[in-house]
Amino acid sequence: MKKAISLFILLLIVGIITSLRSPYLSAQTPDASNAETTSTDDAQKSELQNKIAEYEKKLTEVRAQKNTLAAQIDYMDTQMYIAQLRMDETEQKIKNSEKEINVLGVRIVSLDTSLDKLSKQLLERIVAGYKNRDVTLVDILLDSNNTSKLVNRLKYYDLARSRNQKSLLQVQEAKSNFVEQKDLREKKVEQLDELQTILQQQKVALDQQKDQKQKILADTQNSESVYQSLLQQAKAEYAAIQQITSGGGTETEMRSVAKGETIASVIPGKSCNSNGSHLHFIVKEGASVVNPFSKLRPVDYVNDSNGDAFDPSGSWDWPLPPSIVMHQGYGNTWFVRTYGWYPAHNGIDITGSSKSVSAVSDGILFKGNYSGFNGCALSYVRLQHKDSNISTLYLHVYPQ
């Protein structure tokens, strides 16, 4: 029975040692070449960060001076340069992560060899101890016929026990280091994946900025006079719309209308302070302008706004028949960020499959216009929704 228990304990210890075996390694002290590489990488990172800070400061200064085409292009060039610097920074982080993962790979092989050696040594000592399991201190005392032999055997007995304990501690430490290094390597791989995703996003953003610059040059025909004309036109339209939404337009009540009834037609071609045919659609709750997308239902669309959000989540039918083409979104749009000619866009600019404008609700229809900027009258209709504090405005239209 005693032998069976001893054999079970031996097999259990062997199983534990086997479970400690793993293809991962413990941390090791970096060599001089690694330290030198780290120092170089840190210097490059610091240089990139200093350049980014420098050009972000310049961007802030240029943003306030976007009143000429040259200043506008300078602003966009600065944006693109910062974007390129950020890409360079991300690429450097990717290279550093790849180096760290490779170093971990080398250390993993080293630990595999080290742990194998330690496990074999411990197993040999346990097996040897098992073979001599019946030898006790009493046996040593009785079997030693002189003092010198007794002392030597006691020293050997104590040394063997100490070595076994040391070997077990070494294996346990290697196991602990393996877990730590395994977690570290997994985190580095995750970070590398995240960095590669960020880099792709940065590349897309930079390409968009390049396209936006080309669009501005095309829209203005690379002409300062055309740029100034568009600038004054945009500012005039913004001022007129602000007056209309605050009740400054001249309005006349037309009739009661039902949801879906035709109430206007989008002006074809140019209209007051606008170079192209479109409906500027605004939603008000009381005195406040709200995001039209919070009211309109999802619909088939084409986004022609250079990336403005198109995220309808309401239940209203659209004022124009789909498919909808969105030329400018709501709020902090691409146009607002790029040109900086006005602080925000208080509606959405859209066209549909026809120019017929429909009421989004039952209500009372008013026709109106506003004159005061650039010597033209901005034509619109306003629908006061039935039994509600909501009103909707439809600009750049002929009332019907």
Image: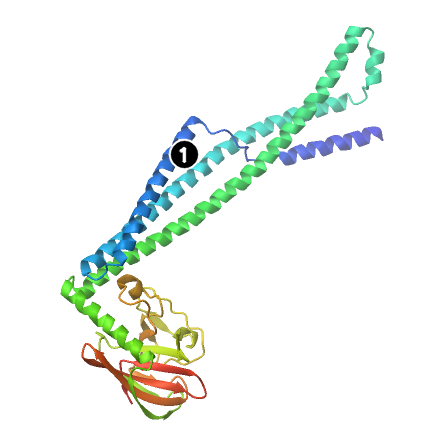
Residue 285, given in percent of the width and then of the height, sits at: 42, 79
Residue found at the very far bottom of the displayed protein: 255
Quarter of the view holding residue 79: bottom left
Residue 240, given in percent of the width and then of the height, sits at: 27, 77
Which image quarter holds the C terminus? Answer: bottom left
Q: In the visual, does 268 lie left or right of 363? A: left
> Can the viewer see residue 320 in this picture?
no
Asked whether 55 or 207 is in front, the reply is 55
Quarter of the view holding residue 96: top left
Q: In the visual, does 59 lie left or right of 108? A: left
Which image quarter holds the N terminus? Answer: top right
The amino acid type, in three-letter code, at marker 1 is Thr
Are there few (<14), some (14-19), or many (20+) residues within 10 Å of tag 1? few
Q: How many marks?
A: 1
Secondary structure of residue under mark 1: helix
Residue 270, given in percent of the width and then of the height, sits at: 20, 77
Residue drawn at x 76%, y 13% as measured from the top left: 153
Quarter of the view holding residue 160: top right
Residue drawn at x 71%, y 32% as measured from the top left: 13
Asked whether 128 or 234 is in front, the reply is 234
> Can the viewer see residue 366 in this picture?
yes
Residue 224, given in percent of the width and then of the height, sits at: 15, 63
Asked whether 122 or 53 is in front, the reply is 53
Asked whether 354 or 265 is in front, the reply is 265
Residue drawn at x 68%, y 34% as measured from the top left: 16
Identify the residue position indicated by label 1 in the image.
Answer: 38
Q: In the visual, does 71 lie left or right of 400? A: left
In the image, residue 337 above or below residue 179: below
